[in-house]
Amino acid sequence: MEKEINSLQKALRKSDRVTVMTGAGISAESGVPTFRGADGLWKNYQATDLATPEAFAKDPELVWEFYNWRRGLVSQITYNPAHKALVELERLVPEFT
């Protein structure tokens, strides 16, 4: 594993552009529920009930309530090591997405 980490570090140092793709689980350590886990957000609702244009057209109040709740939740989290690593990477790489 150390060899792979060293190889990744070398590649990142040479890079001008980096794209990072993560899932919802990156914030789970900070207390943000995942979408599909045992206590996931989709336990009580389907994604199509809250996260589609059709859901908003059908019940905008429910969709706004959900997103307002999510914004409140994430505004109170403590950043975890994965979040901090992404911030550091963004600081070091000229083009980061």
Image (tube, rainbow, N blue to C red):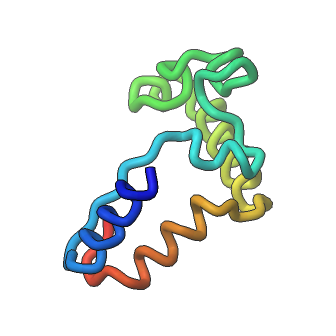
Is 1 displayed left or right of 37 in the figure?
left
Q: Count up the numbered dots.
A: 0
Outermost residue toward the front? 3
Q: Which residue sits at x=47%, y=19%?
A: 48
Q: Quadrant of the C terminus?
A: bottom left
Camera-nearest residue between 23 and 57: 23
Is 85 displayed left or right of 11 in the figure?
right
Q: Which residue sits at x=70%, y=64%?
A: 79
Is 40 displayed left or right of 36 in the figure?
right
Camera-nearest residue between 75 and 57: 75
Q: Position of residue 82 (x, y in %)?
A: 58, 59
Is 5 displayed left or right of 46 in the figure?
left
Camera-nearest residue between 60 and 52: 52
Against 1, is 34 above or below?
above
Camera-nearest residue between 42 and 38: 38
Q: Quadrant of residue 49?
A: top right
Q: Which residue sits at x=24%, y=69%?
A: 11
Against 50, is 64 above or below?
below
Q: Position of residue 83 (x, y in %)?
A: 58, 63
Q: Position of residue 25 (x, y in %)?
A: 58, 39
Against 91, is 74 above or below?
above
Q: Position of residue 35 (x, y in %)?
A: 59, 28
Against 42, is 77 above or below?
below
Q: Which residue sits at x=36%, y=54%?
A: 4
